[in-house]
Image (cartoon, grey):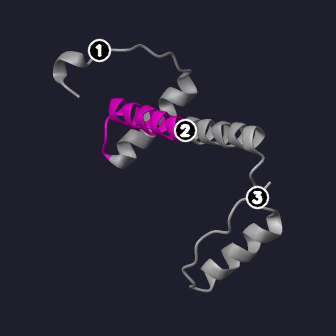
Amino acid sequence: MTTASVRPVVIRIDNTTKARLKRLAAARRRTAHWLMREAIIQYVVREEQREAFRQDALAAWEHYRSTGLHLTGSEADAWLEQLEQGNDIEPPACHT
């Protein structure tokens, strides 16, 4: 992040939350600004990961709908059980 790209943003929080933030900042020896920025960054990263997971799930569902390829639950369980036992085996082939 370059200095030129940083722009101030105003957020409105209630007095109770503001006081809690100040207490936490003091306890952590950080500024309230640092805590808010860190919280926003962590939130954005987490939500980007959730969205990527959701998009992957939608793509997998669409692939299943168009091809019909799948594994049964018992087939997947048997494969996972082998992996848990330390056997490095390939996943079973998908079928219709």
Find the distance from the CA under tag 2 to the CA under tag 1. 27 Å
**Helix, strand or loop status at disc 1:** loop
Residue 40 belongs to magenta span: yes
Q: Earlier in the sequence, mark 1 or mark 3?
A: 1
* Nearest to the observer: residue 59 or residue 27: 59
Look at discs 2 and 3 and give the one toward the viewer. Answer: 3
Read off the residue under disc 2.
52
> Distance from label 2 to label 3 (Cα)?
26 Å
Identity of the residue drawn at 67% across and 43% down:
60
* SS for callout 3: loop
Provide the residue designation for mark 3: 95
Which quadrant is the C terminus positioned in?
bottom right
Q: Position of residue 92 (x, y in %)?
A: 68, 69
Bounds of the magenta span? 29-49
**Quarter occupied by residue 61:** top right
Check disc 1 and report the residue beneath it.
7
Front residue (pair 25, 35): 35
Secondary structure character of the magenta stretch overall: helix
The quadrant where residue 52 appears: top right
Query: Residue 6: percent from the left, percent from the top?
Result: 26, 19
Q: Foreground residue, 92 or 36?
A: 92
> For mark 2, does the 10 Å Cα neighbourhood hold few (<14), some (14 to 19), or many (20 or more) residues?
few
The three-letter amino acid code for the residue at tag 3 is His
Separation of marks 1 and 3 at Cα, in angstroms: 53 Å
Question: Do the CB atoms of the residues marked 2 and 1 lie less than 8 Å apart?
Answer: no
Residue 37 horizontal/vertical position (percent): 37, 31
Three-letter code, disc 2 = Ala
Q: Amino acid at mark 1?
A: Arg
Q: Nearer the viewer, residue 29 or 87?
A: 87
Relative to 67, is 54 on the left or the right? left
